Amino acid sequence: MSSSPDNYIPKSPVSIACNIEKTLEVLGGKWAFLILRELFGGTKRFGELQRSIPAVSPRALTSTLRHLEDKGVLERHVFPTVPVTVEYTLTPKGEDLHRIIKEMKLWAAKWT
Amino acid sequence: MSSSPDNYIPKSPVSIACNIEKTLEVLGGKWAFLILRELFGGTKRFGELQRSIPAVSPRALTSTLRHLEDKGVLERHVFPTVPVTVEYTLTPKGEDLHRIIKEMKLWAAKWT
């Protein structure tokens, strides 16, 4: 009986490490975590994010939001108001990061 | 009634982000995760780690082990045998990373 590649692909240690690398790529960087934290609370407009995280420059905020959008973690919706309204919402892939970030916060609070 | 700084220091969003950065500094890098995974199973000698992770060069293994030791995540014990025996053991701080890595593996398996 052969197992279907769709159902069972044994992963080598190195490919598991690569997957973890992908997780770190999403969460790494100076601002990703703070932005995700805001979005766990629900959809936010660009200006709301800017006000919630005053230490981030508009340029860094834009670049981190684009990075997270490229990684499939959030969606950007543009509404043709005047001025234009841009909203950011986590995808299910992004919502699922909550558990990792919760564990990281617990670890950091205890040990750093 | 004033609260003691030892008991209650409200953390700003930026200082929470800095703590998360510290977590990422420990877990980041190409090999840290694979080495931690081996050590979650108990103390290992350098040669055992090398054999368990054949893809890592001795130089990269040494450098990652030193990085993790500097971060207080593992301890290095040298025994004056011939040839010398070097063992690596997780500290409690290192053992506590297990929960984060477990969540990262689950996320990566589901989404990457």
Image: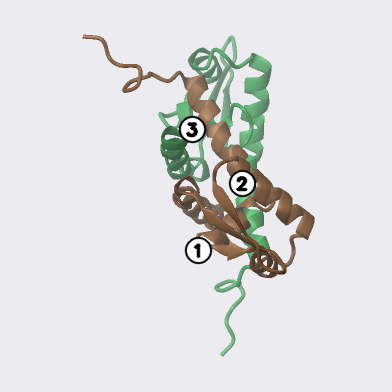
Chain colours: A brown, B green
Three-letter amino acid code of the residue under disc 1: Gly
Q: Is B62 above or below relative to A53? A: above
Q: In which quarter of the image is the N terminus of chain B?
A: bottom right
Q: Name the residue under label 1.
A: A42
Element type where label 3 sits in the image: loop
Tag 3 subunit: B
Q: Which residue is drawn at 49% across and 48% down?
A: A97
Residue B57 position in % (x across, y down): 64, 14
CA distance separating discs 3 and 1 = 24 Å
* Mark 2, residue position: A68
Label 2: few (<14), some (14–19) or many (≥20) C-alpha neighbours in 10 Å: many
Mark 2 → mark 1, Cα distance in angstroms? 16 Å
Residue at mark 3: B112
Q: Is residue A28 visible?
A: no
Circle 1 Cα neighbour tier, 10 Å, few/some/many (<14 / 14–19 / ≥20)? few
Q: Disc 1 is attached to a residue of which chain?
A: A
Given residues B13 and A60, the one toward you in this image is A60
Seen at 59% across and 42% down, the residue is: A26
The residue sitting at 68% across, 49% down in the picture is A64
State which chain disc 2 sits on. A
Residue placed furthest toward the bottom:
B1
Q: Nearer the viewer, residue A39 or B25?
A: A39
Q: Are marks 3 and 1 on the same chain?
A: no
